Image (spheres, rainbow, N blue to C red):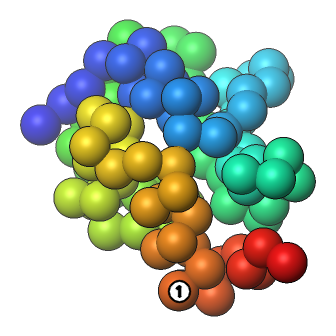
Amino acid sequence: MPRKRVDVEKGLLNKGFRGREGDHHYYNYFNTQGKKTAVFTKTSHSHTEISAGLLSLMAKQCKVPKQIFEQLVDCPLSQLQYEGLLIEGGHVSALP
């Protein structure tokens, strides 16, 4: 199911991602200690909606299945829970 780009971007920003401008909107994940990680995704300036296919690609970039990505964006999944999944998957280091 497609989603509004602004809703997806807002959800990412609320969960520890920080945006930067370019030819796309780029979002890097910063852990709960404020350190930048290698986890990122991006959205296009030219679209107001993100298709289901692109949401799947964004989920892959964010290192989670699409269903978990949707929970991340919709807010049932907290930043701490997301970070735990990234640590379990070996995508980010555990906090000292």
Residue at 33% over, 29% down: 50
Q: Is residue 61 above or below residue 24?
A: below
Q: Is residue 53 above or below residue 59?
A: above
Q: Position of residue 26 (x, y in %)?
A: 71, 34
Q: Please tell me how crowded label 1 is: few (under 14), some (14-19), or many (20+) other residues with Cα within 10 Å.
A: few
Q: Position of residue 42 (x, y in %)?
A: 61, 39
Q: Quadrant of the C terminus?
A: bottom right
Please state which of residues 43 and 88 is positioned toward the viewer in this rendering: 88
Q: Please give the residue where the numbered disc 1 appears in the rendered image.
A: 88
The answer to whether residue 49 shows anywhere in this view is yes
Please state which of residues 49 and 77 is positioned toward the viewer in this rendering: 77
The answer to whether residue 47 shows anywhere in this view is no
Residue at 67% over, 26% down: 25
Residue at 73% over, 80% down: 94
Q: Quadrant of residue 49?
A: top left
Q: Position of residue 54 (x, y in %)?
A: 36, 45
Q: How many marks?
A: 1
Which residue reaches farthest front?
96
For mark 1, give the secondary structure. helix
Q: Is residue 78 left or right of residue 33?
A: left
Q: Is residue 61 left or right of residue 92?
A: left
Q: Is residue 19 left or right of residue 62?
A: right
Q: Quadrant of the N terminus?
A: top left
Residue at 19% over, 31% down: 2
Q: Is residue 75 above or below residue 77?
A: above
Q: Is residue 32 above or below residue 7?
A: below
